Image (cartoon, rainbow, N blue to C red):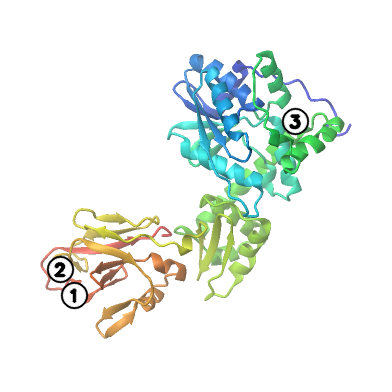
Amino acid sequence: MQSGGRAPASRPRFTPAWLRTQLRALAGPLRGARLCLAYSGGLDSTALLTALAALRERAGFQLRALHVDHGLQAGSARWARAARAQARAAGVTCTVLRVRIPRGSGESIEALAREARYAALAAALAADEQLLTAHTLDDQLETVLLALSRGGGLRGLSAINARGELAGHVLLRPLLSVSRAQLAQFAQARKLHWIEDPSNLDERFDRNYLRRKVLPALRERWPALAVTASRSAAHIAEAQQQLTRSARLAAAQAADGATLRVSALRALDPPARRNLLLYWIAARGLALPDHRRLGEIAGPLLEARADATPRVQWRGGELRRHGDRLFALTAGESAAQPAAQRWDWRREAWLALGDGSALGLIDDAHGDVDLAKLPTPLRVEFRRGGERLQAAHGRVPLKDLLQSHDIAPWQRSAVPLLVRGSRIIAVADLWLAEAFRARDSSTGPRGRLRWRHRFD
């Protein structure tokens, strides 16, 4: 018997009652829940919308829909209006989100559209809303085959999870065990209308080519392929879970604040090192690098000499090394500089600096700041280059101070400077001008500066 050669076993018919059972298994009690459907207006999402609307009152959940208009087709605005009308006919409010897809970046238009779509959906969700998508068993098979064609690792081959997370929101995909044919039967029985996007016929797109040219031949030979591929994806997902647990333990041992110790990474064998890096990069909220760039990170970047400051960049992120620390940054973050601010430190003990760090001035009877001498408000500025500090033995370059405190070159422009007029009073919690320093004989109030850098 050939694997996948038998016809698929009969699966439960798609109905609102079946959907209710699936949702309870994925999300728990439905009463009081706030659900939001990513609604394209096509067959799959229209069937899901109709079943959800039929369940809503009895199950006691709130429901609305979001439609993303990518603007990639001449008729996209017309389809958006049609989607909103279809949702209204089902008694569901539908909001249209319009996004712009950057052109000429060299990236797949499919990947760019997907990223823009999910970013728009995440931004439109309320804090307690759960997002539903209409991914099916067929989508699962297509995703597995596309991952294979692109040399994907376990994360790619584990395909789509029924429950996930999107920017802090619960993401549910209740139709992963339902075929597109089952949804078509449901829609036709209820005489539903849906949008047929003509771009789905464009075989220049990988998924469309696979769907229209490759899968019919595969299904003719292996009718149960979607089911067996989904089973394989589930096995791979279990293996990935084990790797994630291993990486989480290794990351805890290698962590230095929000960075990793390079020496700890070097001590791992190459597979464990790459596994940890992938886990840690994802945990920092960055898109994962491709295979080539991951090899650069796990090899040359970590093996560079101690005084080097190598980096590896990819779309959406970059890793930099300084000494024994590995830093993860969003694209362009290393070149960004917070904006200057006024700080009334008497009213506001901590000042957020806009890059995830903060500057504070706390009361401390043994602190080195003489609060009676410190002016208010102060201005918080940032390094432009060439600044000098007035020290007891003369004026010294600010750059020398930052180097002596082992501040990485790309972090130096984000170090806060307390300024009065044109004079630097303090450099974060690293340096304080003598004129504002508390003496042993000082009897007035004292304080201490604290700089909470986001990497610490």
Q: Position of residue 63 (x, y in %)?
A: 49, 24
**Circles 1, 2 touching at the beta carbon (< 8 Å):** yes
Q: Nearer the viewer, residue 125 or 89?
A: 89
Where is residue 89? Give x, y as percent.
55, 17
The residue closer to the viewer here, 133 or 192, is 192
Tell me the crowding category of disc 3: few under 14, some 14 to 19, or many 20 or more residues within 10 angstroms, Cα based: many
Count of number-bearing discs: 3
Image side of residue 46 versus residue 443, left or right: right
- Expressed as whole percent of the image width and height from the top left, the position of residue 77 reads 57, 33
The kind of residue tagged 3 is: Val
As shown in the figure, which amino acid type bears the numbered disc 2? Answer: Lys
Q: Secondary structure at mark 1?
A: helix
Along the viewing direction, whichever of 206 and 427 lies nearer the viewer: 206
Instruction: Identify the amino acid type marked 1.
Output: Ala
Asked whether the beta carbons under mark 2 and mark 3 sit within 8 Å of each other, the answer is no
Q: Quadrant of the C terminus?
A: bottom left
CA gap, disc 3 and disc 1:
75 Å
Q: Which residue is pictured at 58% across the width and 25% down the height?
A: 82
- Distance of label 2 from label 3 (alpha carbons): 74 Å
Question: Tag 2's secondary structure?
Answer: loop
**Residue designated by label 3:** 227
**SS assignment at label 3:** helix
Q: Is residue 57 left or right of residue 452?
A: right
Residue that mark 1 sits on: 435
Residue tagged by mark 2? 373
Left or right side of 325 for 44 = right
The part of the image, by quadrant, that contains residue 400 is bottom left
Q: Name which of mark 2 and mark 3 comes first in the sequence.
A: 3
